[in-house]
Image (tube, rainbow, N blue to C red):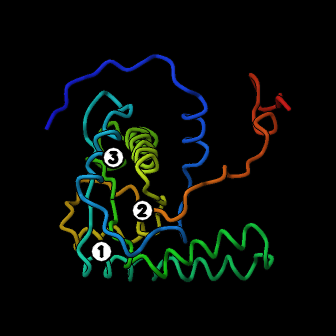
Amino acid sequence: MTHPATEIPTTFDLTQTDGLLRTTKAVSRRLDLTRDVPTELILDCIRIASAAPIGGNREANRWLVVKDPVKRQQLAQLYQEVGNPYLAALRAKAEPGSRQARVIEAGQYIADHLAEVPALVLPIRLGVVGEGVFNAQSLYGSVVPAVWSFQLAARSRGLGTRYTTYLATRAREVAELLGIPEEVTQVALLPVAYYTGERFSPAPRRDPAEITYLDSWENPVG
């Protein structure tokens, strides 16, 4: 269903928009694994995501929502086969109690509980890298902005998400499981659930002056 265009203000309350942008982050332990996510709510997020910039204004992004428990379990098994060895290797190098160790454990939590997440969303792009004019930058550049918009829309609706890519190495098995054709690219897998709690704190990040260069790589701003 196409929704008519509406007039949107050209200015926004920066407290609200900056707060949304700074607190939309990977959610793991705070996903509510007991509460169903209505498909209509996911469609609302996709509707917002579809307004993201697209190369050539070609609407070639697709979304596959997996709610079936058996298929979620099968996806989780593939995910764990890739993720568990990788996380174990990282854990062996991380300092116990460090921020990196906490990040690894959050990733492990998702691997352990992926089958319980009420909705798994796969953003998909028609076409594959190397086909026609598609290089990696152009293909992913037309879908990743939509994925981020989906995550922002989900956050504003009380949903938590996490951008995961472990299943990229198992794309063939995922395609067979979900009936995905060969001539498309599976971009990511997003666990989607209501989040628990009422507040998110902004993620700690370096000062922009420390990571920004002006006119040349040899000229850092900071």
Q: Disc 2 vs disc 1: which is toward the camera?
A: 2
Compare marks 2 and 1 and give the one earlier in the sequence: 1
Mark 2: secondary structure: strand
Mark 1: secondary structure: helix
- Of residue 16 and residue 175, the one placed in the foreground of this image is 16
Compare marks 2 and 3 and give the one earlier in the sequence: 3
- Of residue 150 and residue 92, the one placed in the foreground of this image is 150
Residue occupying the point 29% across, 74% down: 173
Compare marks 3 and 1 and give the one earlier in the sequence: 3
**What residue is disc 2 on?**
194
Q: Disc 3 vs disc 1: which is toward the camera?
A: 3
- Of residue 129 and residue 92, the one placed in the foreground of this image is 92
The answer to whether mark 3 and mark 1 are in CB contact below 8 A is: no
**Residue positioned most to the front:** 198
The disc placed on residue 45 is 3
The disc placed on residue 173 is 1
Label 3 is placed on what type of residue? Cys
Label 1 is placed on what type of residue? Glu
- Judge the density around disc 3: few (<14), some (14-19), many (≥20) Cα neighbours within 10 Å: many
- Tell me which corner region of the image, top left, top right, bottom left or bottom right, holds residue 105: bottom right
Q: Is residue 172 above or below residue 128?
A: below
- Residue 174 falls left or right of residue 32: left
Rendered-image quadrant of the N terminus: top left
Residue 126, image x, y percentages: 26, 47
Residue occupying the point 33% across, 60% down: 121
